[in-house]
Image: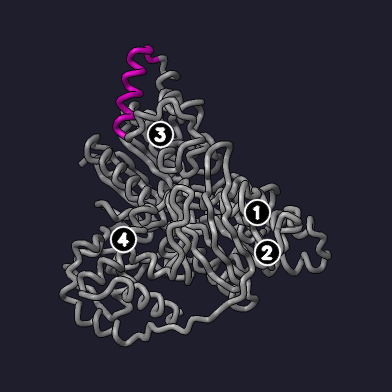
Amino acid sequence: MSAVIEFKDFSFRYKEQSEFTLHDINLTINKGEKVLILGPSGSGKTTLGNCINGLIPFSLNGEIKGSCKVCGLETRDASIFKISEHVGTVQQDTNAQFVGLTVGEDIAFSLENDMTPRNIMLQKVDESATIVGMEKFLLSVPYNISGGQKQKVALAGILHNDVEILFFDEPLAALDPAMGMSAVDLIDKVYREKEKTVLIIEHRLEDVLYRHVDRIILINEGRIILDTTPDELLRSDVLKVNGIREPLYISALKNAGVVFDENDILSNVEKLDIDRYKDKIVSDFHKVNIKENIEKKEKFIELKDVSYYYGDFPALKNITFDICKGEKIAVVGKNGAGKSTLAQLLCGILRPTKGEILINGENYLKYSIKELSAFVGYVMQNPNQMLVKDIIKDEIEVALKLNDFSPELIEERVESTLKMAGLYPMRNWPVSVLSYGQKKRVTIAAILALRPDVIILDEPTAGQDYNHYTEIMNFITDLNEKYGITILFVTHDMHLAIEYTDRAIVFTDGEMIGDDAVYSILSNDDIIERASLKKTSLVTIAKKAGLDPKQYIHYFIKKEREAN
């Protein structure tokens, strides 16, 4: 096989930083390989990707040592235009990639730059859109389509250039579970049918392994830790140590005392021979008491027949439920189901078209948005929509200053929050040099500094590695347990729902279709299908071991929380 990417003794340091981000990288990726680049936030994996697609050194300046060749080109001696003829990139934030007013115009952008004749251009746009399933949306506005559809448009825009390498930077970060599976399917389809070399940067290991991957490159602290097959990686103990969350089924089997054999196929739960471990699984299941004492909690927020319309479009329809003090709730459902609209209603950014919302028994329309911030804090999904300051420390101070906190309390709150969120060493860093995941942590910390009664986090784990995810979630859990703060997670992350919440509220197409214990929701096939959730791998294990999926998920939750 011929090499298409070659790093030899390669190091890189950003102009703004004194230390190197990448150290002595030696890596060869061959034509036709499908490679997952894995690593915690700040590990250097995005920097490595930007060296491959030409953003380094042509858009992001810095010092280079050693050699980086892409399709035979020494990148520092080429140009970003020349490299783009070989590498097509789908960015993590697809909104930043759109330039056209319609889907069709956006897909055609590079063809227009190449002055492709119109008749050929139209044919190529139609072909690319058909490959990704967006041929019926060519006249749609890119910003009005779903997250998964945006990923498809971005991919279509680079397909007709016939590049050798396709590079995906966290393609699953903003997608619901079912749409994430579709994205992985689409990437795999293009990889096989177009015979491309595919590079994927992603935290969600289990979701990427839904389809075959040839190699996994594990990076941490700017160095390659491991370059191996998925099965060998999962047999090792390096994931959690390096800030990566194990697949749920791997954690469940390890919890039951299972020791994996070198012949086990671990990268696909469907192919795992559960019969060999059935006795251990069943025995451990019966050791855990899954009965619970239901504690009645005091109502804090009440939604009564709430609807909200964007013009004539009903984003939420006749929603009724209560939020009690001290609860931890997962709000789940497919993209466009109404979850983010609900979050904006609760914190007062939007107000109900119909129905009413009560806080402590009073209609919340009496409060301004600023006054509501004492009750409800909202961390938006896209951190770039919240950041207003240049320096991290200053960003954490903003809300405290606007709410007239004393200088002494501001200093104490900022320092403690930065430490708890794992940001203290970076407190004087410019926000502009942060990764997407690091920016996410900054926005979470800024709201947490206010200590509101209810905190709503819209996709808090998007772009987070396991270590930072655990730090933030443990911090939020402490706030819940020590101070009784109510937590709502608007999330696609079923791991989060299982590990950190007790109740799940499910939405689809603006309607609430489920409100129950997490283990009941995630074992309900009808709700999973209607809400575009993903059947958890715990269900697969339970069925193969002859156990009730609902009880097995409940067992896993209890086991994990007892261990922590």
In this view, the mark in front (1 or 4): 4
Amino acid on which the number 4 mark rests in the picture = Asp
Which mark is first along the chain, 1 or 2? 2
Separation of marks 2 and 1 at Cα, in angstroms: 38 Å
Amino acid on which the number 2 mark rests in the picture = Ile
Which mark is first along the chain, 4 or 2? 2
Tell me, yes or no, whether the two marked residues, 4 and 3, touch with CB atoms within 8 Å. no
Instruction: Using a 10 Å C-alpha cutoff, classify the residue at mark 1 as few (fewer than 14 neighbours), some (14 to 19) or many (20 or more).
Output: some
55, above or below 203, in the image? above
Separation of marks 4 and 3 at Cα, in angstroms: 30 Å
Amino acid on which the number 1 mark rests in the picture = Trp
Please provide the residue range marked out in magenta: 116-132
Residue drawn at point x = 39 percent, y = 43 percent? 168
In this view, the mark in front (3 or 1): 3
- Nearer to me, 479 or 372: 372
Q: Is residue 159 visible?
A: yes
From the top left corner, tell me how far across and down residue 412 is, in percent: 75, 69
Amino acid on which the number 3 mark rests in the picture = Val
Separation of marks 2 and 4 at Cα, in angstroms: 34 Å
- Nearer to me, 406 or 77: 406
> On the image, numbered disc 2 is attached to which residue?
359
Separation of marks 3 and 1 at Cα, in angstroms: 34 Å
From the top left corner, tell me how far across and down residue 424 is, in percent: 64, 64
In this view, the mark in front (2 or 1): 2
